[in-house]
Image (spheres, helix red, strand yellow):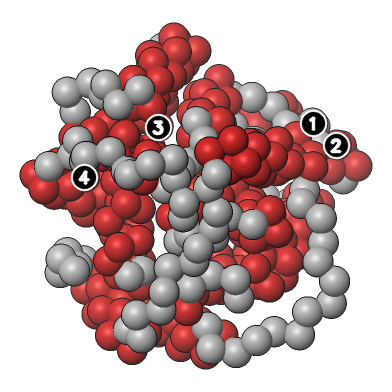
Amino acid sequence: MSPDGDPPAPLATRADMEACRAAIRVGSRTFHAASHLLPLRVREPALALYAFCREADDAIDGSAEPRVALRALEERLDRAYRREPIDNAADRALADVVAQFHIPRAVPAALLEGFAWDAEGRIYPDLPSLRAYGMRVAGTVGVMMSLLMGVRSPGALARAADLGIGMQLSNIARDVGEDARLGRVYLPRDWLAEAGIDADEWLADPQFEPDLGRVVARLVEEAQRLYDRAAVGVTELPVECRPAIHAARLMYAEIGRKVARAGGDSVSTRAVVSARRKMLLLLQAITASVTTPRVVGHPEALPEARALIDAVVEHDARHGVRGDALAGENLLVREFALALAAFERLERGEEPERG
């Protein structure tokens, strides 16, 4: 990338980065294991971003007043962008990452807003409103990961948003029962109404029924459509970054397939991808990373993603930033082996080794 002048001196120390890594190792073992598929120069800033996001999610979710918590986090975000972060490892690391990779403030700010929507128990009347939620809590992550990899074209960012939103839809399809027991239903209300289901009445006694299964299966189909759109965008990423993104796409799609094979029943059971199946999907990811898919057109960005993509384009034009994908490291085999070992330890209940 071509920023204005030299990058600022880092604020985060090695101890700060170790604190971020430790927080993710404890708070999200799956993400920590999966991060081994990324080259180190992408993995480190990704862990830093994720550490701040975890802190933000916990702060809002644990607050009796989500909007008050959101305002406090927005102030932390402002300070990080001014390079005056609070005395906290994740905030110092965040300040470095957003400066180094030219991440517009609008992107992490949208993520924080999505956390607030969650804590408020927002209702989603239709698919576009649900996609707007998915864009905030997951599409933003896809966009930021693309920026960490040096890929900033509007088309690539649109496909990154597709992937993030698709992953969130898969999560929703998998967790219908779990969410219901927390008093939440994320399925589009108009879809439920079309199936003859009153969401509030169903929440009072959440049981699986075939009509609900068809609604869930419909959401799985929408997620798969987004995964298909996202697959093309992976070819724009640096070659050593592709296995991680393909693996995420394939594993979340597999969650959807397991839900669909259960007739859409994610109330009385929860879809789990076995360790053996994960290994096979990782092999597929490595194969997909060195092949070029047949491209039939380039779909436009989802309406819910356009504002944040425009924010990146405007930021880059204003600051003279261009996308320069990271050069390949020819470490696909090594990174793949590390990821396999990490997932094997995870399945045994052990901590993945530090990479």
| Horizontal side of residue 244 vs 33, given as left or right | right
Secondary structure of the residue carrying tag 1 is loop
| 221, above or below 334, in the image | above
Tell which circle, 3 or 1, labels the residue nearer the N-terminal end.
3
Residue 187: x and y in percent read 71, 42
Q: Quadrant of the C terminus?
A: bottom left
Quadrant housing residue 254: bottom right
Residue occupied by mark 4? 20
Mark 3–mark 1 Cα distance, whole angstroms, equals 24 Å
Residue occupied by mark 3? 57
Secondary structure of the residue carrying tag 2 is helix
Within 10 Å of disc 4 (Cα), the crowding (few <14, some 14-19, many 20+) is many
Q: Nearer the observer, disc 3 or disc 4? A: 4
Within 10 Å of disc 2 (Cα), the crowding (few <14, some 14-19, many 20+) is some
Residue 278: x and y in percent read 43, 78
Furthest-right residue in this view: 194
Q: Residue at x 19, y 35 (%)?
A: 11
